[in-house]
Image (cartoon, rainbow, N blue to C red):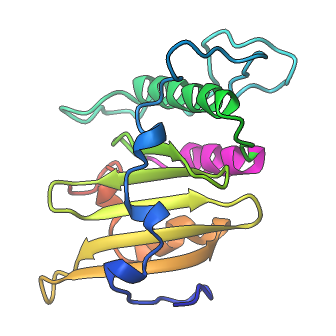
Amino acid sequence: MSFDGTTATASLAQIPSALHERDDRRGTGSAPAGRQPSQKIMSPFLTSATEPFQGSISWPAEPARPIAGQSSRAALFAEIDKRILNLKIEAQAEQINISEKSIDTLVFFLRSTIFSNRPAIFLSDNGNFRAVWKNQNREQIAIQFGSDLTSQAVFFYINPATLLMNREALELKNADLLVEIHKRKIGYLLGEIGKAG
């Protein structure tokens, strides 16, 4: 199967495993026991690389009406920031070169998306970051944020007309990620404000 920016229906076996399987080696977000990083790790959300992490991140404002049973955006962003920092520490301990452009793309996507469901965030072997949103029906949005202008996305969602699971693997321009999510009407997996889910 090729990624050419068009919709491609694929079986699970054809979808790159890095996009749909949990990476247990880096799934917990903690550094290996007894291994400490040799240099300071910076928060990806700072405006200056020389500024030490103070725990305050410039994220979008809270929505006007919180959604019952879901975390506040400030709490979500704090959890995400901590997760990324832990993955950076672990990558340094394992001597994995992380892609700063991948972090930038992930952060831009999260800042431009009104979501309320916390994604699982992983570090792929190629140094790119991956965010996965799943629900109890085994539907998911998984995006590996590329280090160039494109990202790889996998969408599993139930087609309301057929009640069958659609599985799509796409290579998309970063600017088109939300467009493609909305085109399929699967924003509810992100927990978009005002969407059912």
Q: Magenta span has 110?
A: yes
Q: Is residue 74 left or right of residue 58?
A: left
Percent x, y of residue 187: 36, 61
Q: What span is in magenta? A: 100-114
Instruction: Residue at 42%, 39% (x, y): give it.
Output: 27
Question: Quick one: quadrant of the C terminus?
Answer: bottom left
Quarter location, residue 148: bottom right
Instruction: Residue at 56%, 34% (x, y): give it.
Output: 60
Q: Is residue 181 left or right of residue 166?
A: right
| Prevailing secondary structure class for the magenta stretch in the rendered image | helix
Query: Total label count?
Result: 0
Viewer-side residue, 27 vs 183: 27
Percent x, y of residue 156: 31, 71
Instruction: Residue at 38%, 89% (x, y): give it.
Output: 9
Up-down relation of residue 37 to residue 81 (above or below) = above
Q: Magenta span has 101?
A: yes
Viewer-side residue, 148 vs 46: 148
Quarter location, residue 151: bottom right
Up-down relation of residue 194 to residue 62 (above or below) = below
Q: Residue furthest left?
A: 163
Q: Residue furthest front?
A: 34
Instruction: Residue at 60%, 12% (x, y): give it.
Output: 55
Percent x, y of residue 45: 69, 30
Percent x, y of residue 141: 39, 62
Q: Is residue 111 left or right of residue 19?
A: right
